[in-house]
Amino acid sequence: MTRPREGFDLAAIRDHARSKGVRLWTWVHNRALQGRVEEAFAAFERLGWSGMMVDFFDHDDQDTVEFAESILEAAARHHILVHLHGVWKPTGLERTFPNLMNHEGALNLEYLKWSDRCTPRHDVDMAFTRLIAGPMDYHLGGFRAVPRDQFQYRQVAPVVLGTRCHMLAMYVCFDNPTPMVADHPTAYVGQPGFEFIQRVPTWWDETQVPVAVPGSHLVTVRRKGRSWFVGGLSSGPSRSLVLPLDFLPRGPHRLRLWLDDPRPGADPNQLRVEESLVTRSERVEVDVGQDGGFVAELVPLR
């Protein structure tokens, strides 16, 4: 944990990353830190590292919780952010340790490689359960969607449940400071909706939830600077969602909507994009497909 293997030039990797404006994190199994917490974080601070993902705790007994807290304490002393993975559900621990950047503790998209358990209903339920207590790391961006009756789990090129807009909506509806694109890079080349992932922020200045029905659907509104992003996440039958725009400041805004194709039997990987000018006095009605969703970006014109 305190020195790289021979021939692995971490200092050169760090310098190259800095030249590109990138800061570096390291993944580590928690057992590699046991008994060496202070030593390990001091070494990574000297290397100029920014963060560490610590994985596979797999227990929530007192010894394990105290060990995780000791990791966070040492990391804070050495100015390193931490992402806890393979750990118990979020508990608000980041309020005590602000350097806790993200926290897993959730069944997520990787389960679709060997089961059908990560359903669109499960995605919606996460917002009303795990995410109540703080940020949650969740595998996002599955771009190979199939209808429920065509789903078969597989390890290679796995498929997901829910529409493309359902997948995009989780980038807004979930408080997930280190989101990802969970598939192989070729899964995103030329794909509709990927431009939204490139645009959506990972950290927010303001959050509102104007619509929330547990087990069914929710709409989350988040602001970054002067721009607003909206995510509508749904499970079950096709439905219409009404979005009041009274969260907007006064003045015209350009609305860009990414929408499901709500027709029965439509390809869940397709979407359409609409643009219009709106003000805070208006309401937008959005049709979402089965297990669908929508996303939107609103930018002031002045």
Image: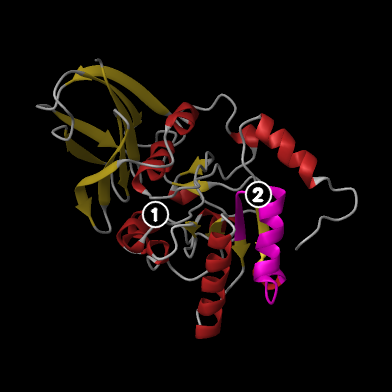
The residue at which mark 2 appears reads as 49
- Residue 298 picture location, percent across and down: 28, 26
The kind of residue on which mark 2 rests is Trp
State the residue in front, 152 or 115. Answer: 115
For image coordinates 47% across by 63% down, the residue present is: 106
Q: Looking at the image, tell me whether mark 2 or mark 1 is earlier in sequence order.
A: 2
The residue at which mark 1 appears reads as 123
> Is 226 on the left-hand or right-hand side of 244?
right
Neighbours of disc 1 within 10 Å: few (<14), some (14-19), many (20+): many
- Residue 289 picture location, percent across and down: 32, 39
State the residue in front, 262 or 134. Answer: 134
Q: Which marked residue is nearer to the observer: mark 2 or mark 1?
A: 2
**Residue at disc 2, secondary structure:** loop
- Tell me the quarter of the image containing the C terminus: top left
Query: Which range of residues does the magenta coloring cover?
Result: 32-53
Residue sitting farthest toward the right: 6
Neighbours of disc 2 within 10 Å: few (<14), some (14-19), many (20+): many
For image coordinates 67% across by 61% down, the residue present is: 42
